[in-house]
Amino acid sequence: MRITIKYLADFQRVTGKKEEVIVLNGYDKLPLKYISELLIQKYGAKMTPDPTVQIIVNGKLGELSKEIKDGDSIVIARVLGGG
């Protein structure tokens, strides 16, 4: 399984990348939560999802229970507010 992950804003600073491709051999699909856990292991606790983090899968807001499959595209961004 091959997925593309794009990082926006502070996630680019955490990872040092704008985008990366992750290859997970032997899988057809996995829950988004598993991908999230891999990123936490790789980059540390700053990758932990919280209410300010949006994870977008193939252009739609994703939940950690969503199944990710080969060829999917994920965008990870932080929601900014102001007033």
Image (cartoon, rainbow, N blue to C red):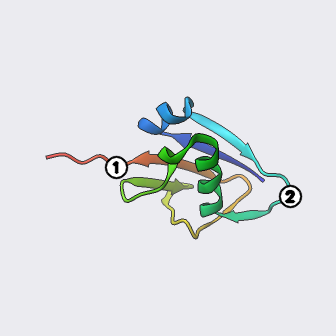
Mark 1: which amino acid? Val
Q: Is residue 29 visible?
A: yes
Decide if residue 39 is on the left or right side of residue 26: left
Residue ID at (74%, 56%): 70
Residue ID at (48%, 45%): 46
Decide if residue 2 is on the left or right side of residue 77: right
The dot on residue 79 is 1
The dot on residue 26 is 2
Q: Which residue lies furthest to the bottom in this view?
A: 65
Mark 2: which amino acid? Gly
Decide: marks 1, 2 in contact (CB < 8 A)? no
Q: Is residue 59 visible?
A: no
Give the secondary structure at mark 1: loop
Q: Is residue 66 above or below residue 79?
A: below
Q: In which quarter of the image is residue 17?
A: top right
Q: How crowded is mark 2: few (under 14 residues within 10 Å), some or many (20 or more)?
A: few
Residue ID at (59%, 55%): 36
Q: Is residue 65 above or below residue 52?
A: below
Q: Where is residue 28 in the image (x, y as percent from the top left)?
A: 79, 63
Q: Is residue 78 above or below residue 29?
A: above
Q: Position of residue 27 (x, y in %)?
A: 81, 60
Give the secondary structure at mark 2: loop
Q: Which residue lies furthest to the left in this view?
A: 83
Residue ID at (65%, 45%): 4
Give how far apart the Cα atoms at labels 1 and 2 are: 34 Å
